[in-house]
Image (cartoon, rainbow, N blue to C red):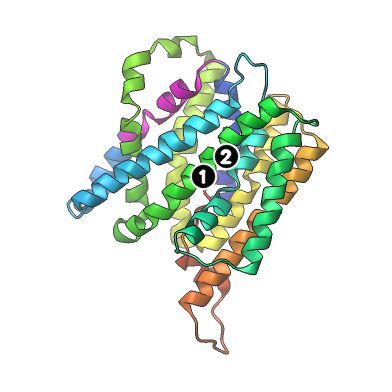
Amino acid sequence: MLTLLVIIWGTAFPGVKALLQVLDPYQLTWFRYAPFPILYGAFLLARRSAVFRTVTGRDWALMAVLGTIGVIGYHFPLNWGLHDASDGVQVTAATGAILVATTPLWTMIISALTGKERWHGATIVGSLVAFAGEAVVVFLGTGHVEFTAARKTLIILLAPLSWAVYSIYTRPLIHKYGGLFVTGVTLSLGTFTLLPLAFQYGVAPLRLLGPGDWAWLAFLAILSTALGYAMWNQALKVRSASAVSAYVYFNPVVATLVGILFLRESVTPFFLLGSALVLGGVILVNRARHAAAAIAADPVPTTAATPSAVRGDLALPASTEKP
């Protein structure tokens, strides 16, 4: 199941890129998320109706704010950066995927700055390596220094930053109400903030879609968004957080291959170098975070050590590198 999820989420980046040829960044966000409250709402009312009665007013407000960050804060910057506007500067789907892969890095930084985690030598080294890779991708990813492209890629970095905030502050809610419930409610509430776009655009933009565009939209709305989150939460029930999060490091690889095959995108040696540094640094940071969580959960050494993958469950992953 996780392999399928990686293929779906990796392929979604080129899907976003393809649909941005006919929809603007804000239209795409709305039409992609419009089915979400309907699909998840029906499921939650049928299977989690009792949980609704336990949610406090403060938690409803918090979930609304976090849902807005997760939907608007993530998708608007990503879609804007991948959109081929009149400036003629193109940012590839692979670039978007590798920048979104820095989500665990931003999660660690925000957690450390707010006192939720401590800095460690490995996290500092991993952060420096990942930031060096980001600099290479942002400023040299096209093969030469291009500041307009760099500006768009820097905007894309707001997406993983927003998802890191979403992941950190939904964690206590997930412990209280469950992952599937919190995911469904927060992102449904976030979708409701897009309703002004529905009134502004209506269905007119959909008339511009061809059969291939409709296929991509269905893929993003149903497979990548609705089904993707359900698969992610189901995977966390049967496997450790560290094991599940390790799979999503392959999202940029899938995005790169699909972008080359279907969008005729190209990659440069500088992009490959920067991507390797980013992924290497992020993996180092994430492993250090899981190790620290394991030590904190079991501070007394034992001769029969608990497998680190099991103890890693105590740190819910924030590395859902979704598109």
| Cα gap from disc 2 to disc 1, whole angstroms | 6 Å
The residue at which mark 1 appears reads as 161
The residue at which mark 2 appears reads as 157
Residue farthest along the right direction in this orientation: 269
Q: Element under label 2? A: loop
Instruction: Give the label on residue 266, or none.
Output: none
Residue at the location (80% across, 31% down)? 143
Q: Element under label 1? A: helix
The magenta stretch is 22-37
Picture layout, residue 96 above or below residue 202: below
Q: Where's the C terminus, which quadrant?
A: top right
Type of amino acid at the residue the image marks with label 2: Leu
Give 257 or 196, whichever is nearer the viewer: 196
x, y (%) of residue 82?
Answer: 59, 27
x, y (%) of residue 313?
Answer: 48, 66
x, y (%) of residue 118?
Answer: 52, 67
Q: Is residue 202 visible?
A: no
Give 148 or 270, whichever is nearer the viewer: 148
Q: Is residue 36 magenta?
A: yes
Circles 2 and 1: CB atoms closer than 8 Å: yes
Picture layout, residue 264 above or below residue 105: above
